[in-house]
Amino acid sequence: MNVEPGAARANPLTRIIDAALQRDGGWLPFDRFMALALYAPGLGYYANASRKFGHMPESGSDFVTAPELTPLFGRTLALQLAEALERTGTDEIWEFGAGSGALAAQLLEALGERVARYRIVDLSGTLRERQQQALASWHAKVEWLSELPAHMRGVVVGNEVLDAMPVQLLARRGGQWFERGVVRQGEGFGWNDRPTELRPPFEIAGAHDYLTEIHPQARAFIATLAERLQQGAAFFIDYGFPEAEYYHPQRHMGTVMCHRGHLADADPLADVGAKDITAHVDFTGIALAGQDAGLAVLGYTSQARFLLNAGILPMMESASLAERTLAARLIHEHEMGELFKVIGFAVGEGWEALGFAEGDRSHTL
């Protein structure tokens, strides 16, 4: 780990993590470390003032998401959301983790009068300020909240929000399972494993050493959402796999990854607060959490198939060459088309949703 002497301890965020380590006897489970690294007020990656979203590293950004890549993403998603609003008899959109506000702007423009209120739930005060600037034209319709209300009605959307929820790390060594946590190591942080009764939800074949994640916070979020969403539907877009692929014997190094300056690295313990930390989504766990809480699964498929079903091709045909080139990244298998998936839920009885009309993979969950 390349940490300059004294640099980590001089970091205000590091001092907060140090205090948490001291309270917990010098060892923090990774999910608590990840939560502080990303969300500590004013200091965590999503709570500080650094620029996150943009096309190129020259902009000072760290990564690009689909809405920043092309407005055709939001316009296509809007067709599915319009159907969901009609089917559920609601007129509100709820977006979780709205990022730069680009998706909200695209949806508000495309949906027009179908939406009476657009509510954004976001923990980041700095991102909220940027969203308010981006959405100034719709200020009369948009409302910001810092937590889920007790009761909700409407259609929920979350693009790349589940992957940023803290995960627990499990390591199998010599046939024994450990929970991997964080300790102080010189001027930086290091790993330390403790025996645990926790296990992955899927049996992993073989006796080889294995590192993976479990997702109690993401599952709890879906369960809480299901409890409070009294009428409506929900759609989540993110990168991940069904359980059998997620916990495949060959995926022995886990999926935790960091993003900074449009480059990826696998060391979440370095440069804490200065880069994103994510993990792929276990979509089987997400589906089960929703079902167990009473939601109906509308479908699960790749982002490419979802966007093709929803009608992105006619939009691409009428777009400029530059716009078509960017939109192609959303559906090409070697770009975002296959790695990213979409899962949909409905309160009560479901319907044959537009985005899952062909190529539904619910049977793989």
Image (cartoon, rainbow, N blue to C red):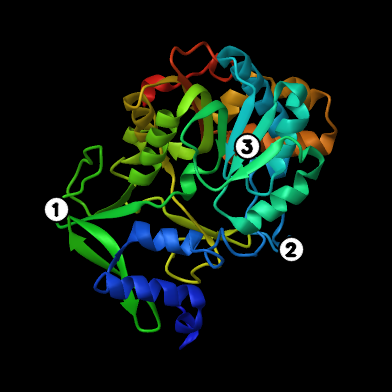
Of helix, strand and loop, which one carries label 1? Answer: loop
Q: Nearer the viewer, residue 168 or 319?
A: 168
Disc 1: which residue: 175
Res 363 → quadrant: top left
Write the residue at 32% across / 72% down: 21
On the image, the x and y values in percent for residue 32 come to 36, 60
Viewer can see residue 90: yes
Residue type at mark 3: give it: Arg
Write the residue at 27% across / 61% down: 180
Estimate how packed mark 2 is, as few (under 14), some (14 to 19) or many (20 or more) residues with alpha carbons within 10 Å: few
Per the model, the C-alpha gap separating discs 1 and 2 is 46 Å
Write the residue at 37% across / 45% down: 217
Sequence-wise first label, 3 or 2: 2
Q: Nearer the viewer, residue 294 or 160?
A: 294
Sequence-wise first label, 1 or 2: 2
Disc 2: which residue: 58
Disc 3: which residue: 119
**Where 233 falls versus 65 (above or below)?**
above
On the image, the x and y values in percent for residue 10 come to 49, 84
Residue type at mark 2: give it: Glu
